[in-house]
Image (spheres, rainbow, N blue to C red):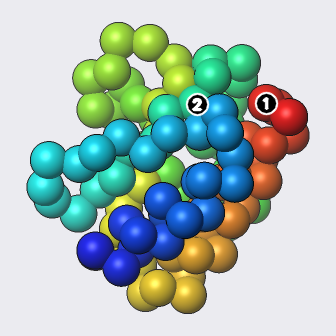
């Protein structure tokens, strides 16, 4: 989990508008992004690209702009999934 969290931070640094929310523990990470795309629409689009993430409202965030990601996948699978998530976000936030 720690390695995947580090990978997420490293890859998210490439998009200035994306922030990794510091976790309090557990095996999930949350990223925050400008709410220029509906979380649910983004989640569905990512499912079509083979990536499963959770919308922020699953974590009780009060507004759009958050995604939950599991830190449990194998490192190579996690890196590929995060790369796809960030590519989708880059299309919307530039």
Which label was assigned to residue 74?
Answer: none
Image quarter of the N terminus:
bottom left
User: Disc 2, disc 1: CB below 8 Å?
Assistant: yes
- Lower sequence index among marks 2 and 1: 2
Find numbered disc 2 in the image and state the secondary structure of the residue it sits on: loop
- In the picture, the quarter occupied by the C terminus is top right
The residue positioned 65% from the left and 75% from the top of the image is 80
Q: In this view, does 57 lie above or below 67?
A: above
Residue 76 visible in the shown view: yes
* x and y, in percent, of residue 48 in the image: 74, 55
The answer to whether residue 45 shows anywhere in this view is no
User: Quick one: SS at disc 1?
Assistant: helix
90 horizontally vs 63: left or right: right
Residue 25 horizontal side relative to residue 81, left or right? left
* Image spot of residue 88 (x, y percent): 77, 47
- Tell which residue pokes out farthest to the top in this image: 62
Residue under the image location 53 percent in, 24 percent down = 65
Residue of label 2: 33
Badge 1 density bin: few <14, some 14–19, many ≥20, Cα 10 Å: some
Name which quarter of the figure residue 17 lies in: top right
Which numbered tag is attached to residue 93?
Answer: 1
Q: Position of residue 19 (x, y in %)?
A: 50, 39
Residue positioned 78% across, 53% down in the render: 87
């Amino acid at each position: 989990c720690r390695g995947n969290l580090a990978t997420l931070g490293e890859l998210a640094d490439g998009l200035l508008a994306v922030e990794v929310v510091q976790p309090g523990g557990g095996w999930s990470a949350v990223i925050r992004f400008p709410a220029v795309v509906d979380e649910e629409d983004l989640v569905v689009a990512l499912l079509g690209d083979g990536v499963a993430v959770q919308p922020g409202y699953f974590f009780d965030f009060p507004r759009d702009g958050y995604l939950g990601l599991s830190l449990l996948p194998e490192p190579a699978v996690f890196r590929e999934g995060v790369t796809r998530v960030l590519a989708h976000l880059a299309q919307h936030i530039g």
